[in-house]
Image (cartoon, rainbow, N blue to C red):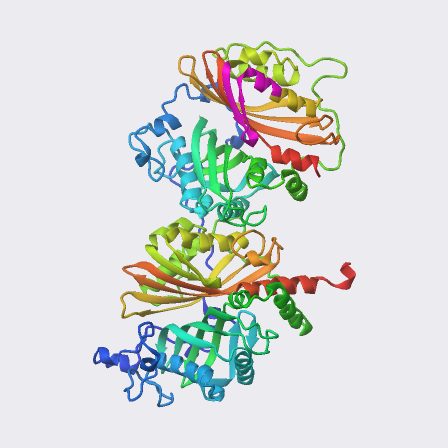
Amino acid sequence: MSEADVPAKGSKSVAQLHHKGPEEAVLQVERRDYPELAPANRTRSQSLEGFDPIYTDIVDYIVRCTHRIWDERDIGLIYSHYTHNCVLYGSMGTIYNREDIVRDTIQRLVSFPERRGMATHVIWSGNDVDGFYTSHLVTGSGRHTQHGHLGAPTGRSFVSHTIADCMVLRNKIYREWVVADTMALIKQLGLDPNTYAEKLASLQLAKGQTSLDIGENRRLLGQYPPETEADTSLATNEIEAGTLRWLHEVFNRRMFGQMKSVYAPTVQYHGPLMREMNGIAAVIHQALGLIGSIPDAAFTPQHICSTPCEEGGTKVAVRWLMEGHHLGHGLLTELGEPTGKRLQVMGMTHYHYKDNKIVDEWNVYDELSLLVQVKLTQLSGARPQDH
Amino acid sequence: MAMQDTDRAAPLAPDLPAQRPGALQGQDAVRVRHEALAPSHMPSDFSISLDSYRKGGTDRFNGRAPEGLRSQPMRGFEPGYVNIVDYIIRITHRIWEEKDIGYIYDTYSHDCTVWDDFGLQCGRDKVIADTIQTNNAFPDIRIVADDVIWTGDENVGFHTSHRSSIIGTNTGYSRFGEPTGKRIQIWCIANCVSRENEIFHEYVVYDTAAIIRQLGLDVVEWARRSAPLCTAAPQNIMASEPRRMLGQGKPPAVTIPAPEDSIDTFVRATFQTIWNRRNFAAIDQVYAPNIVSQGSGCRVYRGTSQIRSHVLAMIAMFPDLHLSVDDVYWMGNAKDGYTVSVRWSAQGSHRGHGPYGGPTGKQISLWGINNWVIESGVVQKEWMMFNEFGILMQIHR
């Protein structure tokens, strides 16, 4: 991909350069009711060259177009909001064109007609010239009332977190990453994760996909200890660089104790499976337990951006991968006894820093996608000649 | 598939660890890693000891170095560490209780060797993975130091026998299954050798069998399931003959000296007389009448009769048992008494009845560490930890 597609983070759009007052600030989500996030008669708070006139800034665009597509059922808006060749990377697989996104959206709405995806934050960077990057945390709730991709309706309700990161230029999303907490959904509906994961794995196998073990993840070079210094080249400011440094310290150098200097004592942690936890010790254990399940895990950040927020402090969004093998016991209890199979965790995390300490963390990765990876490896390895 | 990341610079070459100030370089010290200890290496008093370390109360303990400690030359160690007891106590606290498990990268060598219930573990990465597993299973784990018996110096390496109580609640998944919610408390003795801030050799007895029992699980069942992981004994031979004596001869008889004449001889002669010569009356000579011996399985033996019963039970199960003393070091003097670390190993055929089940005829490797407190010429306190779970895995393989 060319340089021009990458949002030049930190560079200011035309509107920001001619910043006139707080009334023209780009919208922020957490304190606003939906009508304020989809305002009528609001002047644009930033330059949005090529965007539909209805949108007044990038946060308005993300929140409102999601509502129009999912809640108002104008699913066809996907045709004017995604490029024909857009790519959507999900934790369960990749979609390579717009039409499949349309069909996938309809499938989900068939099963959960009442689903409401409520924006919790949009953390963003970029501008209308270089392109925008948005990280959109959605708290989705609904009820499983119809026949669909999960089988017969269970009638049960659910609530779960999803984070969607988008690259947007001229009203169109051209690349997107989505991590939905499918395991939370499956568990809340009372479905059997093993049965569902086996079904998905056998579908992937039928398409000729196999799980490739990448071998070594190179967190360590041979017998050397991990890198002393984090690679902070993704960061555009000090709070992002600091975030990448402590993430490296904790997840690659295994210095879990360092989290006490990063988190506020009152921290609230909102994790996978809708785990709500409080305090530093609890957050440390969530990190330690994940590595417990994947003892050789290498943590690699893929993207970071940040937005100062009106309730004080800054919100930071990190998209990351963790690569390793299921060799231990830890938080990933749905995977059962260690299988030794390769795991790639795709995760996204939003941090809210206030006075240089994290007061809130929203962390999303999907344990079900990991179960599918294990099942696929087991299925693809179980050839008849092995028995 | 990768986005802007493809443009990122290739990972940097690893930082070559900067040579610590004063680190030993280029000396032609042959086999320095395992240089034998001489009696001259043994501290003749307790000025550097856990007792002196914890004077002044707990506020001065653990998280930071207590002030006013006696220091000793520690070439290559991080400057913050004043003496070897300070090093052992604080790295344990930081790794296990502050959860800076990655600090193992700075305090274990890449090629360290660690003997535990399962056999020989090689390499620092295994130590880190195992430590994370245990912390995941027991998040509130505490390692309460009971003593650090040490000897050696910055040249031959510091030898430390770190005895502790491990306490924790099983609220996470472990290799023994889902969380039980049970609280455990066990003794642990870890004998380490360290130089230049890194432990490179360790023998550790965690009392795994007691952990499993305290979790409310069936230890024999788990020994059977874990046995494939156990590399502690050869699997392709049946019982050979432990060489306790030559053919139809008899085990050598030795005289047990007074400890102040030679701790080393006292220890070796005691083990030879009791364990190999089977002269169990010597227990009354060596141990104080009110001896308290604590050990594997959290068992407590009070008085010489109970100790004798324990020795009898072990030799009844392994009738041809031959024990050798592998490593002895101590601190102290005749006036203040001595603290002693004894590491031993033994081979025996499982041909008798006992708590490990009916005879199987299998040859078993046992090993353990004893800590003794010697005062007034006799052993006043004993801790005896051995690889009980390792024994069970070998029997039920």
Residue A263 among magenta residues: no
Residue B30, visible in the rendered structure:
no
Image height check: is B147 above or below A352?
A: above
Horizontal side, residue B29 vs residue B367: left or right: left
For the record, the magenta segment spans B289-309
Q: Nearer the viewer, residue B157 or A120?
A: A120
Residue at x-position 54% and y-position 10%: B257
- Residue B371: percent from left, percent from top: 50, 24
Horizontal side, residue B369 vs residue A364: left or right: right
Image height check: is B199 above or below A108?
A: above
Horizontal side, residue B82 vs residue A109: left or right: left
Residue at x-position 61% and y-position 32%: B388
In the rendered image, which quarter is residue A118 located in?
Answer: bottom left
- Residue B248: percent from left, percent from top: 77, 14
Q: Which of A196 and A306 is in front in this view?
A: A196
Horizontal side, residue A310 vs residue A58: left or right: left
- Residue A250: percent from left, percent from top: 43, 54
Q: Quadrant of the C terminus of chain A?
A: bottom right
In the rendered image, which quarter is residue B392 located in?
Answer: top right
Residue B57, visible in the rendered structure:
yes
